Amino acid sequence: MKRKIGLIGGGQIGGNLALLAIQKQLGDVVLYDIPQAEGLVKGKALDINQLTAVEGYDCRVTGTTDWNQVRGSDVLVITAGVPRKPGMSREDLLEVNLKIMRDVAANIKQYCSNAFVINIANPLDAMVFALYKITGFKKNQVVGMAGVLDTSRFKFFVSEALGCSIRDVEALVLGGHGDDMGPLIRHAIVGGGRLTQLLNKEEIDDVVRRTRDGGAELVALYKTGSAYFAPAASAIAMAESYLLDRKRVLPCTAYLDGEYGIRGYFMGVPAQIGAGGVEKIFELALNENEKAEMDKSFDSVKKTVASVKL
Ligand SMILES: NC(=O)c1ccc[n+]([C@@H]2O[C@H](COP(=O)([O-])OP(=O)(O)OC[C@H]3O[C@@H](n4cnc5c(N)ncnc54)[C@H](O)[C@@H]3O)[C@@H](O)[C@H]2O)c1
């Protein structure tokens, strides 16, 4: 039987999620949005369905404003929420997006109690916390997407700096999805060699800065919203690992229950995603500097989460 993928929010990222899910033939897609956006999701669904003949895809997209059609989804990806405009931080979105999350999470609880839920809406770490609290779902059932994207940006800038294939860059970004996210320089490997021996300090600082500002750089270019191609591809990698039980170890915003000395919060860490959802958290041995960076990032996450009134 085909799997069912529910996409909550049919805007820029939602539309690209639908396209990628069909191109990878992960299952049938339901693209949900509010009644004001009915034409948008019905249009995107029809447009994507009209390309299925080109490659012979058997999966289909349904655009809807009715939660009944989302019912029973195996996996949900949430993009319902407002994106940043130039000059805004992700935290500036908290109030407006929390209101949306209250509505979305209550419906998820009612219609999709067994789904694995991936949140993308910002501010990421606080929104996934709200989602977890409102649904009351198990800690392995709820996760946020940020680390796959931040890590992909990190790898891209490394490959650009070295002029080498991105396939041979191994790297990771830890922590919250904010301005103090932590690209792990010491753990970055290119073709078996350490990044620290391949680039000088200024070059590494530049890679770190561009990684941290990766989202803001796109907001400044687009002017009316934020990144959408790379965020969609990143969330699809997580959904795919769950649906196909790939057990990939991906940087995800996962619930920490004592790992990294943190309990009761969601933070970006390497996590194994398989049929059981978030199956395992991988704890890296961090040095003093890396621990300090993680703590700093955690302080920012705690501050935003403290403003989450449910
Ligand atoms: N986690 C990340 O790495 C990352 C990266 C980029 C963007 N984002 C965030 O993702 C979110 C979506 O970005 P986008 O570019 O797709 O925005 P968008 O404005 O194009 O789409 C958002 C959609 O959500 C819909 N929506 C609003 N209220 C809803 C509700 N109650 N139920 C269902 N849908 C609802 C809107 O109608 C709109 O179509 C933003 O919050 C943005 O900041 C996160």
Image (cartoon, rainbow, N blue to C red):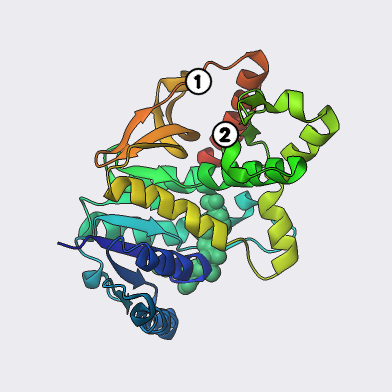
Question: Residue at label 2?
Answer: 172
Viewer-closest of 57 and 309: 57
Q: Is residue 246 left or right of residue 147?
A: left
Number of residues whose C-alpha sits closer than 10 Å to that of mark 2, classed few (under 14), some (14–19) or many (20 or more): many
* Residue annotated with mark 1: 284
Say which of 270 and 23 sits in front. Answer: 23
| Callout 1 amino acid | Leu
Quarter occupied by residue 266: top left
Q: Residue at x 19, y 60 (%)?
A: 72
- Residue at the location (47% across, 47% down)? 145
Instruction: Locate residue 145 relative to residue 175 in the image: left or right.
Output: left
Q: Mark 1–mark 2 contact, CB under 8 Å?
A: yes
Q: Nearer the viewer, residue 128 or 270?
A: 270
Mark 2 vs ligand 1: CB below 8 Å:
no
Residue 209 relative to residue 42: left or right: right
Q: Position of residue 77 (x, y in %)?
A: 38, 57
- What kind of element bears circle 2? loop
160 over 28 or under it: above or below: above
